[in-house]
Image (cartoon, grey):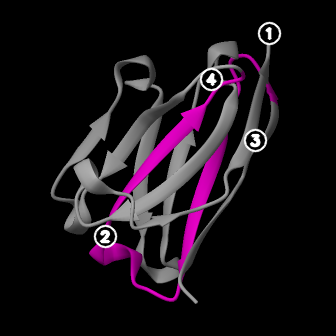
Amino acid sequence: QSQLVESGGGLVQSGGSLRLSCIASGFTLGNYAVAWFRRAPGKGQEGVSCIEAGERGIHYQDPVKGRFTISRDAANNAVYLQMNNLKSEDTGVYSCSAGRLCSTADDYWGRGTQVTVSS
């Protein structure tokens, strides 16, 4: 069974850091683009970052540029999202998805992990 599972969320104070993991089973994550999305309370889902297959490109949305870093770990079939200098507006459920391209990374979805940043 092919699936994505996120982990690493939690409660952190403003200015703190978290590292989210997106681990795949049933398929090789390195062959796919992997995107991170988030949904803040009462708001719609927004893209956060994406890494193309083969690391041909990395993308960040403006609110997280300079604070978040996306990376791959082939040995663990994983993609990480290192989040530094967290702000209260980063609070939300973070989900990862995978697909052929960042623009169409919706073949597989995880269930999400909660990130709460206290001010």
Q: Earlier in the sequence, mark 2 or mark 1?
A: 2
User: Where does label 1 land, which residue?
Assistant: 119
Question: Residue 34 in magenta?
Answer: yes
Residue 4 position (above or below residue 33): below
**Left/right of residue 66 with respect to residue 14 in the rendered view:** left
Residue at the spot x=70%, y=14% of the render?
88
Position of 65 with respect to 19 (left or right) is left
Where the N terminus falls, by quadrant?
Answer: bottom right
Residue underneath mark 4: 90
Q: Which mark is residue 32?
A: 2
Q: Is 96 displayed left or right of 61 in the figure?
A: right
Give the Cα distance between marks 3 and 4. 11 Å
x then y, percent, for residue 12: 80, 29
Q: Dividing the picture into quarters, in which one does residue 49 lie? A: top left
For the point 69% across and 19% down, the residue is 42
Point 43% across, 41% down: residue = 69
**Residue 17 shows up from this direction:** no
Q: Nearer the viewer, mark 1 or mark 3?
A: 3
Q: Which residues are magenta?
A: 12-41
* Residue 92 % position (x, y): 68, 31
Residue that mark 3 sits on: 114
Badge 1 amino acid: Ser
